[in-house]
Amino acid sequence: MAAEYTAYGPNGRPNQTAPFNAYQILQKARKNGRFTGLDFIRNLTTEFMELHGDRRFADDPAIVGGVARLLGMPVTVIAHEKGGDLNDKARRNFGSAHPEGYRKALRLMKQAEKFHRPVLCIVDTAGAFCGIGAEARGEGSAIAENLMEMMTLKTPILSLFIGEGGSGGALGLAVADTVWMLENSVYSVISPEGCASILWKDASKVKEACECLHMTPSDLLKLGVIERIIPEPEDRGELYSLLREAISEEFYKLNALPLEDLCRNRYQRFRKLGVYGE
Amino acid sequence: MLRKSNFKKSRNQLEGFSPNLHTDKPYVPQELCTSCPSCKAMLFQSDLEENNAVCPKCGHHFRLSARQRIGLICDENTYEAWDENLTPKDPLSFPGYGAKLKASRFRSREVEGVLTGKAAIGGVPCAVFAMDAGFMMGSMGSVVGEKITRLFERAAAENLPVVGFTVSGGARMQEGILSLMQMAKTSGAVKLHSDKGLLYITVLTDPTTGGVTASFAMEGDIILSEPGALIAFAGPRVIEQTMRQKLPKGFQTAEFLLEKGFVDAVVPRKELKETIGRLLRLHCGEV
Ligand SMILES: [Zn+2]
């Protein structure tokens, strides 16, 4: 496998320098048995109480959310949840949310704003759900509303990517003041399979597509799309305790900002992204 | 200023047009006739143009280029372009992107996938944008995102309403994550404009899909659509492939979205200018 591997670096030339290439990181991010959103909620927070439903249509189990404490601080936590065993995975559509999932997330964020709680979003999705019901109930409209409302939400938002960050489905929980990624997670505008089938009419050229998309945490840090890469120690307990401290510290920092500055900084964070000539 | 030649030059972007990109000669449309993809009637180009590129037999709405759109909607000689000088780059050195940009520029005779500017519609000054399907299927990369963002920021500063025409295949894969970020960036600018109490009307035209649907296309105070337009987050082909399921007839059309409550009205092209003008006057204090 390794021998036939070629990836495209800058200028489209083959490149094989990174210790873990994008495809290896993708495989780790998608690995069966990897922790899920709920694992993080349970291990990072205490007193978690799940709050269900979007108050309009249904409860989408692909996104879970609720209130909890993070080192004593009341927080709202919202996470994609891919599911545990196969039944659970199927029930949760493998973490691909319907519009009602995004609407529930927004409801909980508005609630957080009202009660001055910071919001922790945990992102892990191959993408928003793709199907008849999702379209009929306005998947695009639901995500669009989240992007707009999150931009001016008057409370801190931190998004943590723990596995897959697929396109608009990930962004719907990631218009945040700061975005962090675990070292074995990815974030991309299109799945590498989708990219490969468009580029080369060959969905099996996933490895090449992974490199083209610049989807690894180190690529994204360079592009200014994320603020921080979280190392993943072997010991998960160590990871959780590291994260608890870091997130809580960040929330204290963000909470100290006047709300006007917080929102202006969030706007500027996205405002500066993009490369063009003038 | 919009000259007649500007309006005419892009007629070759009507549906069914497939230029030979390997020729170095500019494309000159030779066909005098076009077949309507909906009713199969043979139509004279001149008749079609006369009828704003709507099939006189069945009402099928052919695609318009951004310039044609502006010519059709804005009051004569009122369009003033903004940010024309923004040009695309290839930040990820993405395979084939440079060539694709070149071909798109050649084919559409535009620099990028959206025109932005100021104009008057029905006598009311407003900021306008029109996307262009001829430029990489109206996909949103950094330039489209930046131009839309600047449009909303400037409209907010100048207290202007915004009228926008969307047509897009979604986020532009070739700029990777930076394209995705344009969704958040443009949404932020729409919010900024909206929070000033200013009106934003979107007109969804065929096709509006993906990342544009999931951002500024669906963020209008009033969302109109042209008859028969495909409007989707995940396009029908993607759903059919993923779900291995045939889609019901009329799924994801403008009429379907009207029924489901996601657009305010489906407005035939010949009534669009009048409708938009009326809405602008209702909101902008003119009688
Ligand atoms: Zn016809």
Image (spheres, rainbow, N blue to C red):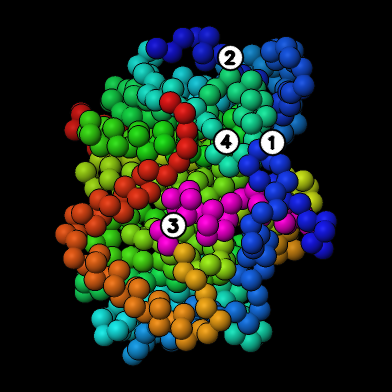
Q: Is residue A219 magenta?
A: yes
Q: Nearer the viewer, mark 3 or mark 1?
A: 3
Q: Which residue is mark 3?
A: A226
Structural distance between the alpha carbons of marks 2 and 4: 28 Å
Compared across the picture, whether B223 is left or right of B247 comes to left
Q: Position of residue A275 (x, y in %)?
A: 47, 37
What amino acid type is highlighted by mark number 1? Gly
Q: Nearer the viewer, mark 2 or mark 4?
A: 4
Q: Which residues are drawn in magenta?
A: A203-228
What amino acid type is highlighted by mark number 4? Asp
Q: Which residue is mark 4?
A: B90
Q: Position of residue B233 (x, y in %)?
A: 55, 53
What amino acid type is highlighted by mark number 3? Ile
Q: Which residue is mark 2?
A: B9
Check disc 4: other Cα within 10 Å, few if <14, some if 14-19, many if 20+. Answer: some
Compared across the picture, whether B237 is left or right of B155 comes to right
Q: Position of residue B266 (x, y in %)?
A: 48, 42
Judging from the image, mark 1 belongs to the subunit labelled B
Q: Which residue is mark 1?
A: B96
Whether A59 is drawn above or below B198: the answer is: below
Whether A90 is drawn above or below A127: the answer is: below
Residue A75 lies in quadrant: bottom left
In this rendered view, identify the residue nearer to me: B51 or A98: A98
Residue A206 lies in quadrant: bottom right
Check disc 1: other Cα within 10 Å, few if <14, some if 14-19, many if 20+. Answer: few
Q: Are marks 4 and 3 on the same chain?
A: no
Residue A108 lies in quadrant: bottom left
Structural distance between the alpha carbons of marks 2 and 3: 43 Å
Q: Are marks 2 and 3 on the same chain?
A: no
Which callout, 4 or 1, points at the residue further toward the start of the chain?
A: 4
Which callout, 2 or 4, points at the residue further toward the start of the chain?
A: 2
